[in-house]
Image (tube, rainbow, N blue to C red):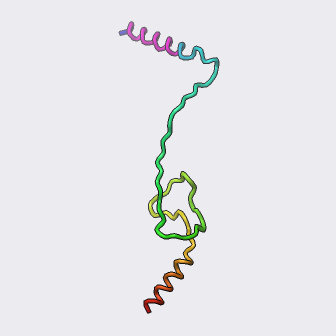
Amino acid sequence: MKRSAAILLVLVVACGGLSGCGRDGKASVYTGVLEGKSVEVPAMTGGKVISLLVDTGEEVASGDTLVLTDTSELVLQREQLTAGLE
């Protein structure tokens, strides 16, 4: 048991010593691919955007207001339809 522990210790020290060889003090550089999820949210009504309340990449929850739109044109259309019904 003591002999296998001594062998293991020698292997760990040897691997640690060899892993530092040949770097010349430079940091290791790793590359990879980061994939994201893109979700498009369609507007339920049209209109001119007055204010954008969130930034790209910002986390939002269901029910959060993302954009304020100018609804004056929609109000006029509703008034015309109401007047037509009367």
| Depth order, front residue of 59/44 | 44
Above or below: residue 53 compared with residue 45: above
Q: Position of residue 37 (x, y in %)?
A: 46, 48
| Depth order, front residue of 11/23 | 23
Say which residue appears at 50% left-offset and 86% top-offset. 80
Q: Is residue 7 magenta?
A: yes
Above or below: residue 85 compared with residue 8: below
Q: Residue furthest left?
A: 1
Give the extent of the magenta segment.
3-16
Q: Residue furthest top?
A: 3
Left or right, residue 21 beside residue 83: right
| Depth order, front residue of 63/16 | 63
Say which residue appears at 64% left-offset and 17% top-offset. 24
Above or below: residue 12 compared with residue 52: above
Using the rendered view, name the quadrant where residue 1 is placed: top left
Q: Position of residue 69 (x, y in %)?
A: 56, 70
Q: Main secondary structure of the magenta part?
A: helix
Q: Is residue 19 magenta?
A: no
